C-alpha cells in the first residue's frame, strides 16, 4: 500500500482507539495548529529523518505529549512529505 494512501486513511476523520493500531505500527500526531493523527510503520523509527523529528519532539515537549501519543513538532504536510520519502528509501 502506498504511504500516501495509508496516511490519508489515518486522516479520514475516523477515531480509532489505541488497540486499533495495526501490529508493527504506531500512532503519532503532527501539525502546528491542529494536530492530525498518523499511523506509521515502526520501522520508520530507525530512519535518520525520523530520528531528527524525535529529537525535535524531545526538545519541544520532553515526555509530555498532550494528545496522549507521540507528538511531532512539524506541519502535517511536511510530515506527509517526509513519510513519503521514507517509504521510497
Image (cartoon, rainbow, N blue to C red):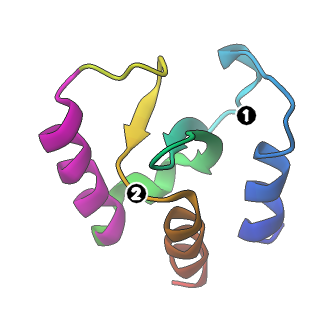
Q: Which residue is drawn at 73% across and 56% down?
A: 7
- Magenta-highlighted residues: 49-63
The quadrant of the picture occupied by the N terminus is bottom right
Q: Name the residue under label 1.
A: 22
Q: In which quarter of the image is residue 6?
A: bottom right
Q: Element type at marker 2?
A: loop
Q: 56 left or right of 59? A: right
Contact flag, marks 1 and 2 (Cβ < 8 Å): no
Residue 88 at what x, y percent from top left?
A: 59, 84
Q: Is residue 70 above or below residue 5?
A: above
54 magenta-colored: yes
Q: 19 left or right of 68? A: right
Distance of label 1 from label 2 (alpha carbons): 24 Å
57 magenta-colored: yes
Q: Element type at marker 1?
A: loop
Q: 71 left or right of 10? A: left
| Dot in front, 1 or 2 | 2
Q: Is residue 60 above or below residue 2?
A: above
Residue 14 at what x, y percent from top left?
A: 87, 30
> Pointer 1: residues within 10 angstroms few (<14), some, or many (20+)?
few
Closer to the N terminus: mark 1 or mark 2? 1
Amino acid at each position: 500500500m502506498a504511504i500516501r494512501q495509508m496516511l490519508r486513511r489515518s486522516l479520514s476523520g475516523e477515531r480509532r482507539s489505541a488497540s486499533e493500531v495495526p501490529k508493527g505500527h504506531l500512532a503519532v500526531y503532527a501539525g502546528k495548529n491542529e494536530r492530525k493523527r498518523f499511523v506509521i510503520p515502526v520501522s520508520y523509527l530507525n530512519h535518520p529523518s525520523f530520528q531528527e523529528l524525535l529529537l525535535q519532539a524531545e526538545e519541544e515537549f520532553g515526555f509530555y505529549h498532550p494528545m496522549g501519543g507521540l507528538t511531532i513538532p512539524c506541519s502535517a504536510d511536511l510530515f506527509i512529505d517526509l513519510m513519503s520519502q521514507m517509504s521510497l528509501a
